[in-house]
Image (tube, rainbow, N blue to C red):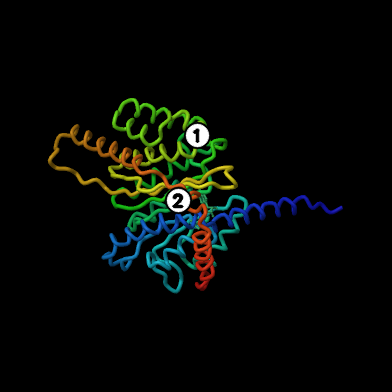
Amino acid sequence: MVDYREDIEYSKKVEKRKESTLSFICPKKHYVRKEGWLTIARNRKEVVSSRVETQGYIRYFSLCGKEAIDVLLFEREGIIRANARGYPDVCYCDFVEDNPLEFAKLKETLGKTKGFNMRFEELVYDGSFQKLVQNEPFDVVNLDFCGSCFPKHDAPDSKTLRAIECVLKLQSAVSFNLFITFRAQRSSENSGAIKELRDVMEKNLSQFSDFKSVYEEKIGFPLNILCENDYPSFLLHTFPKILLGFGNNYNLGGECIRRFYYKRKEGEYKIVKFIFSFEPRRENNRFSDRSRKTVQLANAYHKSIINCLKNSPINVDDVLTNKPSLRAKLNNDQEDLIKNRGKFKI
Ligand SMILES: C[S@@+](CC[C@H](N)C(=O)[O-])C[C@H]1O[C@@H](n2cnc3c(N)ncnc32)[C@H](O)[C@@H]1O
């Protein structure tokens, strides 16, 4: 008798993959691409407009997925350049756990653009990311993860977090934007990591009255309740502190300039998105005294955390509710972008 179990398993995997590929074609996601990523990338392009090596275009790193809609959007909007072979200032990395062959499909969209078929974390740990940025650091790094920031099976300071910290270290000589996306689903995350983050934030709230008053004004109930009852919101309000702290370690001044969130799978979990801006801190020669410099740095870091709390995150579900025309416009725009892919010879 023929055993079809393997076939059945395979088609389940394909279905799963189809589902996740489809999930990148989503009006909510496209809203953030356009209102968040594109706006910030445009500003960044202004900053690099006189750079000769890239003819004023930005250098972009992305976990772009098979459709690479972010890359297609940036090209159409004149943020990145294309040549006959691909995108010379773009680099991507993609790893699909249950189907590594998916990577080949990216070439259909991206031609000979530099790409790595591996986990982003490995790209950082094996030194490849360092080689990439040594002479040509990125202007925008887009870490559009599908998973969570503190996976259950990982240590509290997860591999992903450590890799992100490494990116900040390697990029610390230049100003750049960092986009980060995570799935926020309490049940699939590491409770040790969540507790550590909550403890640090609680300590800060009890230490700094200005921080406490902004927190109370914006959120209104204690951190432990927020963490239990609305984990995505907890993450939106606490994760920036980790990243701004990493920046501070490498003398990068940072701001979390935008945050977005929206429901997936009818509220089974939420997607949270952060947009950061980092800039190397200039030495202030007025302060030759080392301890005064340290105080200055601590103040700037503290201010950036408070600034982040002052701007509320954008609820994309709310923005799109009862706006069928905006949804349709976003869907059409994605379809148009995808239609135009596949122009490079491979
Ligand atoms: C959300 S999609 C990217 C969508 C794209 N940025 C866009 O705007 O359409 C994320 C892609 O990165 C891959 N990915 C997720 N986590 C990864 C990791 N840690 N390392 C490498 N690739 C990863 C996923 O397989 C997926 O193809």
* Image coords of residue 93 (percent x, y): 48, 55
Please identify the residue farthest to the right as the structure is shown. 1
The numbered mark at residue 155 is 1
* Image coords of residue 26 (percent x, y): 54, 56
SS at mark 2? strand
Left/right of residue 123 with respect to residue 102 in the rendered view = left
Task: Please tell me which residue lies in front, 63 or 305.
Answer: 305
Task: Please tell me which residue lies in front, 344 or 304.
Answer: 304
Neighbours of disc 2 within 10 Å: few (<14), some (14-19), many (20+): many
Whole-Å distance between the Cαs marked 2 and 1? 20 Å
Q: Up-down: is 101 above or below 272?
A: below
Left/right of residue 133 with respect to residue 331 in the rendered view = left
* Image coords of residue 199 (percent x, y): 41, 27
* Image coords of residue 19 (percent x, y): 62, 54
Kindly identify the amino acid type of the residue bearing the numbered disc 1: Ala
Q: Residue at x 62, y 51 (%)?
A: 98
